[in-house]
Image (spheres, grey):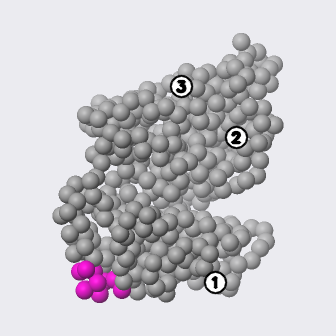
Amino acid sequence: MTTPHQSIFDALSAALGSDAVLDPGRVADRATSYWNPAPMQAAALVRPRTTAELSAVLKLCNERGQSVVTHGGLTGCVEGAISDSRDVIVSLERMNAIEEIDSIGRTATVQAGVALQKLQETVREQGLYFPLDLGARGSCTIGGNVATNAGGINVIRYGMMRQRVLGLEAVLADGRIVSSMNRMLKNNAGYDLKHLFIGSEGTLGIVTRVIVQLEEAPSSRNSAMLALDSFAQVTSLLRHVQKSLGGKLCAFEVMWGQYFHTVTAPGFHRAPMGRDHAFYVMLEAEGAQPEADQEGFLATMEQALEQQIAADVVIPGSETERRALWEIRENFQALYEHKPIFLYDVSLPIRDMDAYIREVQQRLKARWPDSICNVIGHIGDGNLHLFVHPGTEGEGLHKLADDDVYLPLQAIGGSISAEHGIGTEKCARLPISRSAIEIELMRTLKRTLDPGGILNRGKVVALQAADAA
């Protein structure tokens, strides 16, 4: 039984038990995030075991006007999990069970704290496949994937997390539980409420359980890395493999030459081909007929060389070699030899990408002559990641780099976020990609579902003080 005079730590401990709640000292033993090793800050960190326990936590916090920050795997890139000493952190680390796998309906029912890789490996044992995939697979959680509408390397074929979610359960700010655990592909009975929570970054409710759609496990996988000498060749290659491989193409990852040259320098990844080409592409196709698929894939690569679409190609001969190629794309620690470095995640039409990157790099060079802008991206689905090193130190550098990266997107209808979300880092930049009416509608949803403004306060769309009074 809690009383109004108890501290929030004592109230949560009384409601859930002392083993479920960490005090500020124990919270500080944790790192702020995967990206930030500084001690975590919070008035308390609570680890509910069930949806009912989370409901009790949010009901208590809502009654007190207590701000709440939600934690999953802490791999987000937009400071969405940042907390301070006044916040209560809700970590879903104990809600980590895979409750059911339906091999006939090809669905899995999972709790929000399940790591992506754990789900991938568990369904694989039953001949099934969960195709969402990203570099943080070992740490990121399904709940976090839902909250950010995660994308990754297979979007071109399988879509983002939104396309994988059939149903979900979430707890609203006042503790009410919204259970929309739909298992059907087709359900047109009124509003599809799950979409309120997918991509909302925990600002409208906290997702606790999810029903995801699975696929049959592919029996063939063919991969290649190609070197190209112009962006025109990149787009020609994309059309070529889409036409030749059809629906089998699942990944088409592009690396600008400077990125490839940096991460394959001595002491980092071994370069499988010459390091001085303008672009490099890592692509992958999956199918159900191993011999025919391999034959068709090899023919497609040979045609790319014969038609002078690509300058060179490397095809791995083993899983070890395949993983080594992917490491070049996914493991970019070499970039962090330069400090500070700012990571960006944007989307824009493919036809505008070359000119956009040139403009951004020109802007950065004009501002900071020693700046470096490395670029990679899921080009098949219009997504680029930029790593900006200003080449100098000082205050306010990140905001200035933001101007150079984000402002050119307006004229071409691009987005300041393709898959990482908004968090606090991009909140002020939202008007670049969303109209005033869209932003006000977002605020209306926030005021309706979280009138006290307690959930991930100040993230995505910030409410005015009067709104949350």
The first of marks 3 and 2 along the sequence is: 3
Picture coordinates of residue 401, whole percent (x, y): 65, 71
The first of marks 1 and 3 along the sequence is: 3
Residue 365, numbered label: 1
Label 1 Cα crowd, 10 Å radius (few <14 / some 14-19 / many 20+): some
Q: Secondary structure at mark 1?
A: helix
Q: Residue at x 64, y 46 (%)?
A: 81
Which residue is under mark 3? Answer: 51
Residue 14 visible at all: yes
Residue 99, picture quadrant: top left
Picture coordinates of residue 75, whole percent (x, y): 59, 51
Q: Is residue 9 magenta?
A: no
Question: Type of residue at label 1?
Answer: Lys
Picture coordinates of residue 33, whole percent (x, y): 67, 50
**What's the distance in space between the residues labelled 2 and 1, CA to CA?**
40 Å
Which residue is under mark 2? Answer: 465
The first of marks 2 and 1 along the sequence is: 1
On-image quarter of the N terminus: top right
On-image quarter of the C terminus: top right
Q: Is residue 307 magenta?
A: yes
Up the image or down, 97 lies above or below 71; here it is: above
Q: Secondary structure at mark 3?
A: helix
Up the image or down, 233 lies above or below 283; here it is: below
The range drawn in magenta is 302-311
Q: Secondary structure at mark 2?
A: loop
Picture coordinates of residue 60, whole percent (x, y): 67, 23
Q: Residue at x 26, y 53 (%)?
A: 219
